[in-house]
C-alpha cells in the first residue's frame, strides 16, 4: 500500500503554490544558462589540468618535504575538482546541448575518479535523485555496511557502523562507491533489505560476471595509472611518487565523503517509508527539500565540494551547474520559508556532526525514527 503525499485541500494548495514558485525560479535561471556556463567549466578544467601537471612534476622532482607537500596538494585540487565541480556536474547533463561544450557531454564524459560513469548515471542521477530517501527505491539509504535511515532493517554489523563510516572515509572511498553502483556489493553482501539487491537482479553467473566487468573497466586502468605508471616514470623515486598519489587520493576521498554524508542524513532530515509517492510536482519538490541538508562554506570551499553545500538546490535542479545553484540559493530559501517547507542549513561542521550522530544512533536496533517530512506527516 503506497503512502501518497498530499491529501487535504489546504495542503494540496500550499504545495501547488510551492511548486509554481520553484518552477518560476527554474524558468528564470534556465533562460540564463549558455555560453557563460561553458566558459566557466572550460576555465575551471584548464585550471584543474594545470594543477595536475604542477602536482605530478613536483612529486617527481621533490627532494624535501615542502615541494612534496605542495605536489600532493596540487594533485588533490585537480582530483577534487574533477570529481565534483566538473565531473559530477557534467555527468548530470548540465552542459548537454550547449554549444562549444564538447568534452563535457554526460554520455561521453570521463571523470578522473575510479567510478564507472554509466553505472553512476543510472544509480545516482535516476534512482537516487528521483526517489531520495525513499525506502526500497533510493539505493543510497544504505551504503555498504552503513545504515543511513531507520527504514533499512537493523543487522548485527550495524552495531559498529560509526567505525565503518569513518573507515570508509579513508583511502578507496571512490573505489567503494564503484562497488556500490556497479552492483558488486549486492553480489557479495546484498543491501540489507527484503528486496536484497539494488543494482543486480540476482546472483546468477552471468550477473556476477557483468557486475565485475563494470567495476573493473574503470577500477583497473585508474589504479594502474596512479599507482603503477606514474610511480614507474619516477624511476628511483617510485615509492615517493606512489605515496604522493595515495595521499592525494586520500584527501579527495576524505573531502568527498565528508561532503556526501552531510547530504541526506540527520535526526531532522526526512526519510520516507517504502511506497511513499508524491502526488503532484509541488509535493515532490517539498520531499526533496525536506530529505536534504545544506551547509555554509566560502566560495573556494564550495567549489571543492562541487556545489553540494547547495544540496537542496541541486536536488531541485540537478541539471544546473554549481555556479547557478549558488546564484539561486537565496530565492529557493525564500520560497521554502514562504510556503512552509523546511529548509535546513548550518555550518559544515555542525551538519557533519549531525550526520555522524544520526549514523551512531542508527547502530542501535531500537533507534527512534528520524524526521519523516511534513508533507508525509500531513497524510498519516
Image (cartoon, rainbow, N blue to C red):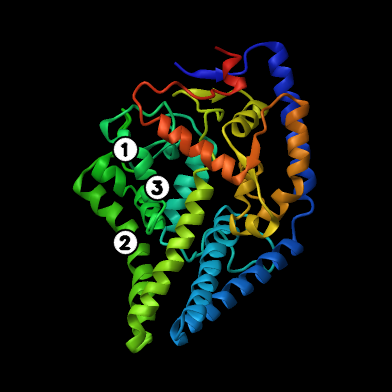
**CB atoms of marks 2 and 3 within 8 Å:** no
| Residue 197 visible here | no
Estimate the x, y position of residue 182 in percent, counting from the top left.
36, 51
Which of the pair 121/188 is nearer the observer?
188
Nearer mark to the viewer, of 2 and 1: 1
Nearer mark to the viewer, of 2 and 3: 3
**CB atoms of marks 2 and 1 within 8 Å:** no
Estimate the x, y position of residue 51 in percent, counting from the top left.
57, 75
User: Going from the N terminus, do you reach mark 3 or mark 1 first?
Assistant: 1
| Residue 236 visible here | yes
User: Going from the N terminus, do you reach mark 2 or mark 1 first?
Assistant: 1
Q: Which residue has dot 2 on it?
A: 216
Could you give the CA–CA distance between mark 2 and mark 3, rounded to whole angstroms?
Answer: 25 Å
Which of the pair 260/34 is nearer the observer?
260
**CB atoms of marks 3 and 1 within 8 Å:** no
Q: Secondary structure at mark 1?
A: helix
Toward the front, the furthest residue is 65
Estimate the x, y position of residue 162 in percent, counting from the top left.
38, 40
The residue under the point 38% across, 54% down is: 178
Which of the pair 289/21 is nearer the observer?
289
Horizontal relation, residue 331 to residue 83: left or right: right
Q: Which residue has dot 1 on it?
A: 160
Estimate the x, y position of residue 263 in percent, counting from the top left.
55, 41
Horizontal relation, residue 90 to residue 30: left or right: left
Q: Secondary structure at mark 2?
A: helix
The residue under the point 49% across, 40% down is: 128
The residue under the point 63% across, 52% down is: 307
Amino acid at each position: 500500500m503506497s503512502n501518497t503525499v498530499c491529501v487535504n485541500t489546504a495542503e494540496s494548495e500550499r504545495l501547488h503554490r510551492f511548486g509554481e514558485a520553484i518552477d518560476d525560479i527554474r524558468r528564470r535561471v534556465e533562460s540564463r544558462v549558455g555560453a557563460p556556463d561553458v566558459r566557466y567549466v572550460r576555465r575551471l578544467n584548464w585550471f584543474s589540468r594545470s594543477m595536475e601537471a604542477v602536482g605530478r612534476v613536483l612529486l617527481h622532482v621533490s627532494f624535501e618535504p615542502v615541494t612534496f607537500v605542495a605536489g600532493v596538494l596540487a594533485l588533490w585540487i585537480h582530483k577534487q575538482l574533477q570529481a565534483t565541480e566538473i565531473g559530477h556536474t557534467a555527468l548530470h547533463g548540465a552542459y548537454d546541448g550547449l554549444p562549444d561544450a564538447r568534452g563535457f557531454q554526460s554520455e561521453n564524459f570521463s571523470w578522473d575518479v575510479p567510478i564507472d560513469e554509466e553505472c553512476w548515471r543510472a544509480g545516482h542521477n535516476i534512482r537516487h535523485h528521483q526517489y531520495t530517501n525513499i525506502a526500497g527505491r533510493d539505493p543510497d539509504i544504505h551504503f555498504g555496511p552503513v545504515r543511513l535511515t531507520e527504514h533499512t532493517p537493523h543487522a548485527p554489523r550495524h552495531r559498529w557502523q560509526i567505525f565503518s563510516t569513518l573507515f570508509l572515509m579513508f583511502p578507496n572511498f571512490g573505489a567503494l562507491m564503484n562497488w556500490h553502483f556497479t552492483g558488486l556489493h549486492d553480489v557479495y553482501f546484498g543491501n540489507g533489505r527484503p528486496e536484497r539487491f539494488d543494482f543486480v537482479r540476482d546472483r546468477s553467473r552471468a550477473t556476477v560476471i557483468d557486475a565485475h566487468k563494470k567495476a573493473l573497466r574503470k577500477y583497473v586502468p585508474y589504479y594502474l595509472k596512479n599507482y603503477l605508471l606514474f610511480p614507474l616514470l619516477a624511476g628511483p623515486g617510485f615509492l615517493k611518487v606512489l605515496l604522493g598519489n595515495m595521499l592525494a587520493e586520500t584527501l579527495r576521498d576524505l573531502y568527498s565523503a565528508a561532503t556526501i554524508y552531510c547530504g541526506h542524513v540527520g535526526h531532522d532530515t526526512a526519510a520516507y517509508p517504502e511506497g511513499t509517492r508524491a502526488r503532484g510536482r509541488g509535493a515532490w519538490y517539498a520531499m526533496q527539500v525536506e530529505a536534504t541538508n545544506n551547509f555554509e562554506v566560502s566560495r573556494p570551499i564550495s567549489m571543492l565540494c562541487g556545489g553540494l553545500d547547495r544540496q537542496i538546490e541541486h536536488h531541485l535542479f540537478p541539471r544546473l551547474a554549481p555556479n547557478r545553484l549558488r546564484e539561486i540559493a537565496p530565492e529557493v530559501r525564500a520560497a521554502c520559508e514562504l510556503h512552509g517547507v523546511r529548509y535546513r542549513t548550518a555550518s559544515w561542521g555542525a551538519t557533519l556532526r549531525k550526520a555522524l550522530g544520526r549514523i551512531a544512533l542508527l547502530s542501535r536496533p531500537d533507534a527512534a525514527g528520524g524526521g519523516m517530512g511534513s508533507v508525509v506527516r500531513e497524510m498519516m
